[in-house]
Image (cartoon, rainbow, N blue to C red):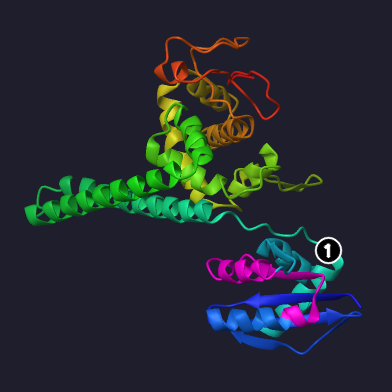
Amino acid sequence: MTMFAGIDVGASSVVLVCRQNGRGSAPETFDQSVAGHAALVRRLCRVAPQCVVLEATGIYYLDLALALQAAGLPVAVINPRSFHHFAKLKLVGSKTDGVDAALLAEYAERMNPALWQAPEPHRLALRDVGRQINRLTAARTQAKNRLHALRARASTLPLLIDDELEGIAVFDRRIQRLTAAATDLLDQAPLLARQCQLIDAATGIAKASAIAILAELCVLPGHLKANQVSRYAGLDVRLWQSGTSVNQRARMSKAGNAYLRAALFMPAMSAVRYDPRAKAFSLALQRRGKKKMQAVGAVMRKYLTGIWACLKTDQPHWCPNVTRTGTAACRKCARCRSSRVAQVVDPRGVVRTWSD
């Protein structure tokens, strides 16, 4: 008989429920450790479920998912948001680890989720390094803001200013060290190194930003479309309208990868300031009534769409020196001279400008 399994993942333990013939088994608890994962794998190998479902719960699910897939078990890692709505649909009043595991097993039976494919180890390593660069960059920005506030006061002790300067210098060294480590990882993977060059060719994207963006995109399945990647980043537009009484403004959902959004923010801000096309696109949106930060969010989505197209088509990001219909490499830009083609590409491979 067909069997399905649901696993509720926690910080210290994981709970398993198997479901067969519409009925769930009693919950079984395993330690959140290497030994506990091994025991859980042995238990599942004995029953041979058709699908094992678990949520993508922060940092706790990955090692277990890798262990399950290494054992040849069919694993589906689902978005916690979709499981939350499934639980609401079932009108379940209680919430315990056992109840959640049983619901996950039922989700596996009813929803037929797509199976999860583990990213390659060097891609996971690059993502970890990229996220640490992202965190350190945010901490350095906070330190610079504190330094600005201290310098704005005439009564500030010089010791406090020196302390913040030392902290910023430490952040700079750590970011440089991690960027060098990420570069070493890219050198071991020629495809990723090529993709990093494609991203770095875009206006406003420095090497550290290119690494942070690639670190989040390299673990995604290559078959995703641009709008799916935008939703993954939380850059999709959320509408809240019904009849004549409910008509809220459209907003960015932000229900996605915060690391990817953070990595795209400063490049978008730089592009709006220094890139004529991005600036014209932003101003056009503001003339239509959008606020400045809404326009920046739209530029972020434009950038992400173009970057994803570059990664899928293996072509460099658009160059302002290339005409709308041009197909030859630009001779004015050093980056374009180093590549064969410099085109404005969208997800369909069409040459476009920012004003389209």
Q: Is residue 320 above or below residue 149?
A: above
Q: Position of residue 88 (x, y in %)?
A: 77, 70
- The verdict on residue 333 being magenta is no
User: Left or right of 158: which side holds 350?
Assistant: right
Task: Residue 273: give x, y in percent of width and height.
Answer: 41, 26
Q: Which residues are magenta?
A: 44-71
What residue is drawn where x is 82% and y is 46%? 243
- Along the viewing direction, whichever of 108 and 46 lies nearer the viewer: 46
Picture mark count: 1
- Residue plotted at (77% across, 82% down): 46
Q: Amino acid at mark 1?
A: Met
Could you tell me residue 333's position as x and y percent?
42, 15
Residue 52 in magenta stretch: yes
Circle 1 SS class: helix
Q: Position of residue 308 (x, y in %)?
A: 60, 36
Asked whether 149 or 218 is in front, the reply is: 218
Q: Quick check: can you spot residue 149?
A: yes
Question: 15 or 355, which is in the foreground?
Answer: 15
Q: Which residue is mark 1?
A: 111
